[in-house]
Image (cartoon, helix red, strand yellow):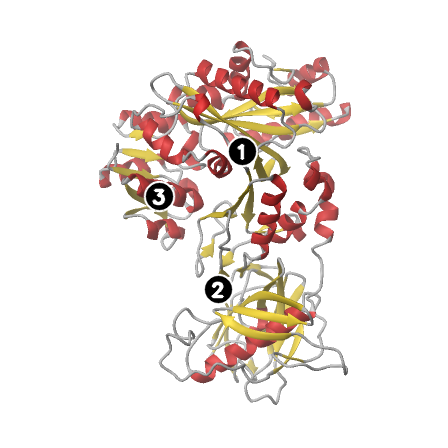
């Protein structure tokens, strides 16, 4: 076994490998870019080495820098995680040449299976069916078009290199053929540096099913059953589950045998995944080889949860030369597991990636729930990398129980400071077709409008009451001289840690005028009290912890979470994120200042709608200096006191990030 392993990745991928190293008694070494100097994986590792600037090309994709870090730390092996260099055959070969074990398949296998054309040929030679298609020797646009015509429309135009659906184009009619080929080639060249294309028959409404395999250096190859990955958008997976709901024992056995045959034909070693498209259902369903991923997949935890096999530990043991401790009959799956990918993105705006600080991040702790995450509260989602923050994995004895557990856990998974896809995931898991298992790879794209429409709602009364109570908490903290950020700090505002006096009773009522994303003011709410029309109860909100609130409204009781300043109060309630502005009446003595210093910044990523001042201008307290727009609401940057504008560092239409000064007063 290795004594020290360098993990050449970041985020959740690196964290997962670090934890496997700990369980094996191996010292983990992290690498990081400038953007990740304070990242979770850096703090969890025993040692960490800087690679370079934030862009991946200058850090995590810089093979020479990664190998230099291995030499510097004396690492005996490099685990590439999943992504970045994990499927780079040149890097794998360089590791071998440097005398460092690459935890993955041999370089020649990565090269062979990394070409979709070569992989199709190998699978066909191994007796595994492939999607009918053609790779034309004539790689001109017209040559590819001729191949498509011979095959017959509709077809898929696909790049030979790369993955993730990049460059893949559906063509159903002749006029769209040549433009699709040209666009596919442009995207392939830009992303992979290889414009080689091939053509496949388009299978309507297929399911995407993959088989996990393990192969050691002693001739043993086994599969660990299947995962369904049909719930994807733009060819990128969103939800995965195992077992495949529509699989029969005979179909499962045939697909497993086919995956092992492909692995043996490739001379495969370590962990890998053989992916298939499935047409039809039952014992007579037809499956076709799609591709082989020569790395660990993001969705591997659901296989771990049902088989009890630690796949990352198995990878490390195989790379160290150990034989597989199981034969095929030893691996028996149990129960059902579902994984959802939690992204920093805005489903309401075409899944636009989000970036910014995590003002509040709390993982649910429930039976049957596992969270694999690469972020933590107080950290930041960077603009430089993939927006996936975490994966939530739910296990139960049955599929429906696992699905319900996943939904319940998502409702208790508050992430505040940025938009996430959690509300979208809840709606997806509650969709009748998902419940019944009647899905295919086009399901999300087809149902997207309906799924997203349900997310566009105004804040309910409970959310407004929580926002008002959060303002009261912040005001009380400010008066006491401790606590920041619109919710309890981890120490100073904790009554058990504070040296100041504390009494177990509600905060006094504080009036606030609240407005939601549409910018329409609501009547003043008093947190923690009842009011309004006689006989009609308003929500009652009680502080129960660090940023956590209990909301009672009639017979209903919920938990809610809040964070952020009054100008952009984030509230997580019943599986949804709301952004609420809260201002106090002008004559309220406890009115919190919009900002507490003279360099004024946006509280979140936003677009500059208007700049209302210029350098040299005298302004008064409360005057609007800059108007921002974000998440369907206006966010005013307000002068905290009288002064003169020293500088303005933004312009209308500009996208600004949180914490970056926009205007400075003197």
Q: Check disc 3 and report its element: helix, strand or loop.
A: helix
Which image quadrant: the N terminus? top left
Q: Position of residue 112 (x, y in %)?
A: 46, 19
| 311 sits left or right of 47 in the view | right
* 571 is higher (above) or lower (below) than 453: below
Label 3 sits on residue: 18
Q: Depth check: 594 or 77 in front?
A: 77
Camera-nearest label, 1 or 3: 3
- The image's mark for residue 190 is 1
Q: Position of residue 174 (x, y in %)?
A: 76, 23
Residue at (68% x, 40% y) in the render: 434
Q: Is residue 639 visible?
A: no
**Label located before the other in sequence (1 or 2):** 1
| 531 sits left or right of 83 in the view | right
Q: Is residue 263 visible?
A: yes
Label 2 sits on residue: 660
Q: Residues within 10 Å of mark 2 (few under 14, many from 20)?
A: some
Q: Residues within 10 Å of mark 3 (few under 14, many from 20)?
A: many
Q: CA distance from mark 1 to mark 3?
A: 33 Å
- The reply to whether dot 1 and dot 3 touch (C-beta < 8 Å) is no
Q: CA distance from mark 1 to mark 2?
A: 32 Å
**Label located before the other in sequence (1 or 3):** 3
Q: CA distance from mark 2 to mark 3?
A: 33 Å
Q: Position of residue 415 (x, y in %)?
A: 53, 58
* 553 is higher (above) or lower (below) than 7: below
Q: Position of residue 130 (x, y in %)?
A: 60, 16
**Label located before the other in sequence (2 or 3):** 3
Q: Depth check: 345 or 253 in front?
A: 253
Q: Depth check: 89 or 457 in front?
A: 457
Dividing the picture into quadrants, the one containing residue 489 is bottom left
- The image's mark for residue 68 is none
């Amino acid at each position: 076994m290795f004594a020290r392993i360098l993990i050449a990745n970041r985020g959740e991928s690196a964290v997962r490998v670090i934890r496997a190293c700990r369980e094996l008694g191996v010292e983990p070494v992290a690498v990081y870019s400038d953007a990740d100097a304070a990242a979770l994986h850096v703090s969890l590792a025993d040692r960490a080495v800087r690679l370079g600037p934030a862009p991946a090309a200058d850090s995590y994709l810089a093979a020479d820098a990664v190998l230099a870090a291995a030499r510097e730390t004396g690492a005996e092996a490099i685990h590439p995680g999943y992504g970045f260099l994990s499927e780079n055959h040149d890097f794998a070969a360089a590791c071998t040449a440097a005398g460092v074990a690459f935890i993955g398949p041999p370089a020649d296998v990565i090269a062979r299976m990394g070409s979709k054309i070569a992989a199709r040929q190998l699978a066909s030679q191994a007796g595994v069916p492939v999607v009918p298609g053609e790779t034309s020797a004539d790689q001109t646009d017209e040559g590819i078009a001729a191949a498509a015509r011979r095959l017959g429309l509709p077809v898929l135009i696909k790049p030979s290199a790369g993955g993730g659906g990049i460059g893949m184009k559906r063509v159903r009619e002749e006029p769209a053929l040549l433009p699709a080929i040209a666009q596919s080639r442009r995207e392939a060249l830009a992303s992979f540096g290889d414009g080689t294309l091939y053509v496949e028959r388009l299978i309507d409404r297929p399911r995407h099913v993959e088989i996990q395999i393990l192969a050691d250096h002693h001739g043993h190859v086994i599969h660990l059953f299947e995962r369904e990955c049909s719930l994807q958008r733009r060819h990128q997976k969103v939800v995965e589950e195992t077992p495949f709901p529509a699989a029969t024992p005979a179909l499962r056995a045939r697909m497993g045998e086919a995956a092992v045959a492909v692995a043996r034909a490739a001379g495969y070693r370590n962990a890998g995944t053989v992916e298939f498209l499935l047409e039809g259902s039952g014992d007579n369903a037809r499956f076709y080889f799609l591709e082989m991923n020569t790395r660990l997949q993001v969705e591997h935890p659901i296989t771990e949860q049902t088989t009890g096999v630690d796949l990352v530990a198995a990878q490390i043991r195989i790379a160290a030369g150990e034989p597989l401790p199981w034969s095929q009959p030893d691996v028996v799956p149990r129960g059902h597991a579902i994984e959802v990918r939690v992204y920093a993105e805005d489903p309401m705006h075409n899944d636009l990636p989000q970036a910014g600080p995590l003002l509040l991040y709390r993982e649910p702790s429930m039976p049957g729930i596992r969270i694999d995450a690469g972020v933590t509260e107080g950290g930041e989602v960077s603009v430089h990398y993939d927006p996936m923050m975490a994966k939530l994995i739910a296990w139960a004895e049955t599929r429906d129980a696992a699905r319900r557990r996943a939904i319940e856990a998502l409702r208790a998974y508050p992430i505040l400071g940025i938009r996430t896809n959690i509300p979208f995931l809840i709606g997806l898991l509650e969709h009748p077709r998902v419940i019944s298992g009647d899905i295919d790879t086009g399901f999300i794209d087809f149902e997207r409008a309906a799924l997203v429409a349900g997310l566009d709602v105004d804040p309910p009364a409970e959310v407004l009451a929580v926002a008002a109570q959060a303002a009261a908490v912040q005001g009380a903290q400010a008066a006491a001289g401790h606590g920041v950020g619109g919710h309890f700090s981890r120490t100073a505002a904790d009554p058990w840690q504070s040296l100041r006096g504390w009494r177990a009773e509600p905060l006094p009522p504080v009036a606030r005028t609240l407005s939601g994303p549409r910018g329409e003011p609501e009547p003043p709410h008093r947190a923690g009290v009842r009011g309004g029309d006689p006989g009609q109860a308003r929500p009652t909100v009680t502080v129960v912890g660090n940023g956590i609130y209990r909301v009672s409204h009639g017979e209903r009781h919920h938990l809610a979470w809040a964070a952020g300043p009054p100008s952009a109060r984030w509230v997580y309630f019943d599986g949804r994120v709301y952004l609420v502005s809260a201002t106090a009446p002008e004559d309220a003595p406890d009115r919190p200042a919009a900002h507490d210093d003279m360099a004024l910044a946006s509280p979140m990523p936003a677009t500059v709608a208007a700049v209302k001042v210029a350098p040299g201008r005298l302004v008064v307290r409360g005057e609007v200096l800059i108007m921002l727009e974000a998440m369907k609401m206006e966010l005013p940057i307000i002068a905290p006191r009288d002064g003169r504008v020293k500088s303005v560092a933004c312009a209308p239409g500009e996208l600004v990030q949180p914490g970056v000064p926009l205007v400075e007063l003197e």
